[in-house]
Image (cartoon, grey):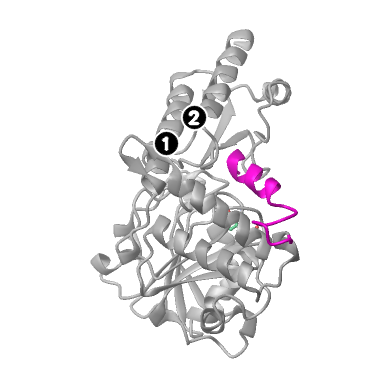
Amino acid sequence: MPEAVLQRAAAEMLDWQGSGMGVMEMSHRGKEFGAICAQAEADLRQLLAVPEDFHVLFMQGGGLGENAIVPMNLSRGGQVDFVVTGSWSVKSHKEAQRYCQAKVIASNADSKHTRMPDPSTWELSADASYVHICSNETIHGVEFQTLPDLAALGSQAPLVIDFSSHVASRSVDWRRVGLAFGGAQKNLGPAGLTLVIVRDDLLGHALDICPSAFNYRTVADNQSMYNTPPTWAIYVAGLTFQWLLQQSEGALTGVAAMEQRNQAKARLLYDFIDASPFYENKVSPDCRSRMNVPFFLVDETRNDDFLSGARDRGLLQLKGHKSVGGMRASIYNAMPLEGVQALVDYMREFERSHA
Ligand code: PMP
């Protein structure tokens, strides 16, 4: 979370803009929260350049909830194509099997999820209801640097992207996307809010078993207020959208500025790892994530020493996911370049004293 956002949320915690109530105490149907929610949507649309024929839905259930909610809304019970590139798309494929014929049309499992399968090799089905990808695999640190152009590959199916862990870190080419979903808790705000951005023509085809509160048509028709939305999370995400819109790098602003900053952060860390004989990143350079950098000490017996020295310097949460091991630096939007520099400085110092 950007510190400025946390400070603003703290300052307004007990009394939002002279209303005499904090956001957590407001009715979601009152004019105050209505204004907060409408502003958040408008700011998000501007930030991500969301076209007018897409709905912005503020939902609950998280990324894993959407693994069921998307097929219930979009599959029409037919066939869905999955590109499996890491733990999160593995989970998406598995969950979808409960609602539709979920087919793996490409996978990078043979490379232990360290390379993205080239879209020209995907065996796209002629009649898929949609094609699912995870555009940034948080655990394995692989990211699509450009979204696949399904139309150019001869498919009419809409592309669904799970952009949970890199939303707002780079621009989205909406011409290539039918639906994007993500939990808010990496780049947008507190856990509890799930963002869905969906093209209008994809609504209205939900399976009968789809809960009303998860039917995109119902959620859209009720401006995300069919049931009580996660008001606090929407408010804090709204503050983050404003913070993001204010960011600049030279002539660039908003997401374009963040993209440039994120490129610089990632380059700093990857360049250091690649130049060092002490550390290693196993991901193919052309698909490395700018957000999640898994890395290993070549001598893994030093892992615990590395982590405890890092903790002493306030460098936290560096332990890799248990399924991959090693270390992982998650350098989301709110992490400044100085934070990555502090990590690199520590890694250099640790290498010098242990090599
Ligand atoms: N997809 C991706 C890419 C994720 O990174 C995560 C969470 N780390 C999820 C899905 C699951 O999200 P949630 O915990 O909000 O269900």
Outermost bottom residue: 208
Q: Is residue 266 left or right of residue 343?
A: left
Q: Residue 172, image x and y in percent?
A: 37, 57
Which image quarter is the C terminus in?
Answer: top right
Local packing at callout 2 (Cα closer than 10 Å; few below 14, some 14-19, many 20+) is some
Amino acid at dot 1 = Arg
Judge whether residue 109 is colored magenta: no
Q: Residue 37, image x and y in percent?
A: 56, 66
Amino acid at dot 2 = Leu
Which of the two residues, 105 or 154, is positioned nearer the viewer here? 154
> How many numbered discs sit on the rendered protein?
2
Q: Is residue 287 above or below residue 63?
A: above
Local SS, label 2: helix
Outermost front residue: 18
**Which residue was labeled with disc 1?**
261
**Which residue was labeled with disc 2?**
337
Instruction: Name the quadrant where ligand 1 sits.
Output: bottom right
Q: Residue 85, image x and y in percent?
A: 48, 54
- Residue at image position (61%, 77%) is 225
- For the record, the magenta segment spans 1-21
Contact (CB < 8 A) between labels 2 and 1? yes
Residue 236 appears in the figure: yes
